[in-house]
Amino acid sequence: MSNEKETTQEQEKKNEQIIEMGEAILGEKRKDHVIYLLSIIGEIEGHDCLPSTSKTTKYEHVLPKLATIEDDNNIDGVLLLLNTMGGDVESGLAIAEMIASMSKPTVSLVLGGSHSIGVPLAVCTDYSLIVPSGTMVIHPVRMSGTVIGARQTYDYFQQMQDRIIGFITSHCTVTPQQVEKMMMNTQMLTKDLGTILVGKQAVDLGIIDAVGGISDAFTKLYQLIDKKK
């Protein structure tokens, strides 16, 4: 009876983790490949809290979790699921840099979309995939609220944009010139600058490694884990 109660409590805890955080540990029963599933959903929330009606991923939750995963010898790899509209640049880059620096094998899968600062998050893993209908939006840095119309402001914008371009191009085969050209494209978005890439287009440009789905993501991650072992 005691064992059944413990099993029930453990399952409830796992269900709560999925519901509240979009996270799960997979393969515990098999023990051959233990995968941590981490999802980046909705808007990436930074230092300012977004409305409670918005679907968000809070970076202050993700960063400690990544540190815990890195320090856990029982976890073999990380599968990152992405369906994000972007969000806070500093927070998105912080998450991307942390994932990129992990010693455990990592694979990302773009589902729905990975827009704006979601692009660095999609390419920060050891291998990246996108579903055929998945989208990526590449556009210049934008800022809401009051902006001081001074040269220093525009220099800051350029510096931030250079950081994003530098990160993207250091984790895939697209060139800085190609990324900047896509950012400044005036032909595609009616109310903004930028470029929309769908599925294979992101692969053809060298941003994403391959078109695929969840089974492909697991297969690749298993291969990376076996190679590391």
Image (cartoon, helix red, strand yellow):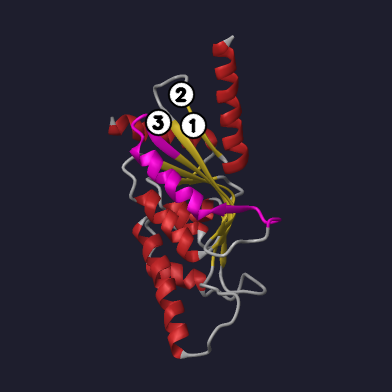
Residue ID for mark 3: 222
Residue ID for mark 1: 25
Residue ID for mark 2: 28
Considering the numbered disc 2 on the image, is that residue within a helix, a strand or a loop? loop
- What crowding class fits label 2: few (fewer than 14 Cα within 10 Å), some (14-19), or many (20 or more)? few
Of marks 2 and 3, which one's residue comes earlier in the chain? 2
Question: On screen, 174 above or below 203?
Answer: below
CA distance for labels 2 and 1 = 7 Å
Image coordinates of residue 109 in percent, x first then y, are 51, 44
- What crowding class fits label 1: few (fewer than 14 Cα within 10 Å), some (14-19), or many (20 or more)? some
User: Is there a contact, CB below 8 Å, between mark 2 and mark 3?
Assistant: no
Q: Which quarter of the rendering shows the C terminus?
A: top left
Can you name the residue that lies furthest to the top here?
Answer: 1
User: Is there a contact, CB below 8 Å, between mark 2 and mark 1?
Assistant: yes
Q: Which quarter of the rendering shows the N terminus?
A: top right
Q: Is residue 3 visible?
A: yes
Q: Is residue 206 visible?
A: no
Pair 2/3: label in front:
2
Image coordinates of residue 182 in percent, x first then y, are 50, 69
CA distance for labels 2 and 3 = 14 Å
| Foreground of the two, 65 or 109 | 65
Pair 3/1: label in front:
1
- What crowding class fits label 3: few (fewer than 14 Cα within 10 Å), some (14-19), or many (20 or more)? many
Give the magenta part as a residue range: 52-78
Left or right? Give the position of 173 relative to 4.
left
Considering the numbered disc 1 on the image, is that residue within a helix, a strand or a loop? strand
